[in-house]
Image (spheres, helix red, strand yellow):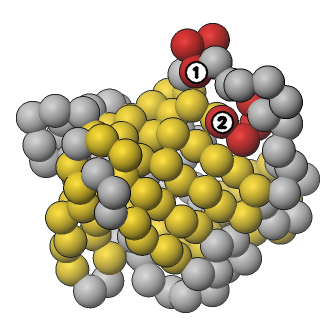
Amino acid sequence: MPKLDLSQMPMKTGSIYPEPYAGMMQGRSSLRLGEAGGLTQFGVNLVTLQPGALSSLRHWHLNEDEFVMVTAGECVMVTDAGETLMRAGDCAAFPAGRADGHHFLNRSAAPAVFLVVGTKAPREVATYADVDLRVEIEGGKARFTYRDGSDWEGPR
């Protein structure tokens, strides 16, 4: 595989979240490095958070491991244990099945960039820690539910 040319990759913005949560993802973008390189067993994404942006809703994965390394700038990692300042070179790991909701916020005045590497499980369930929301992903299709498994119809 030749060297990946980041300048030729499409920037992914937006979210698969239902509203009102999709609108909260303004200022987040990513390059799908693993996809561009033809990887199928794990994902690799380079995420940029503009000042004030958040990476996602706080979540944890049932079947997928997730690893994050900050490559530029600084951001705040929020987990069930609280907040941790993350700077270039800092890493965090989130093993599958550990119910510790996490996400990253950029409270600085400059962009923050981090690399995310994660498993691509055939079936995944992500649970969101601060809202009554789950997503089930299978066959590339996402189905949003409440935590009790009933179909998502909006915040309750």
Which amino acid is tagged 2? Answer: Leu
Toward the viewer: 125 or 4? 4
Q: Judge whether 24 appears above or below 94 on screen.
A: above
Q: Which residue is mark 2?
A: 33
Q: CA distance from mark 2 to mark 1?
A: 8 Å
Q: Position of residue 154 (x, y in %)?
A: 49, 54
Q: Quadrant of the N terminus?
A: top right
CB contact under 8 Å: marks 2 and 1: yes
Q: Is residue 155 left or right of residue 104?
A: right
Lower sequence index among marks 2 and 1:
1
Q: Position of residue 56 (x, y in %)?
A: 42, 53
Q: Splitting the image into 4 quarters, where does residue 153 fall? A: bottom right
Q: Residue at x 64, y 18 (%)?
A: 5
Q: Is residue 150 visible?
A: no
Element carrying mark 1: helix
Q: Which residue is mark 1?
A: 6
Q: Residue at x 64, y 35 (%)?
A: 32
Q: Quadrant of the C terminus?
A: bottom left
Q: Residues within 10 Å of mark 2 (few under 14, many from 20)?
A: many
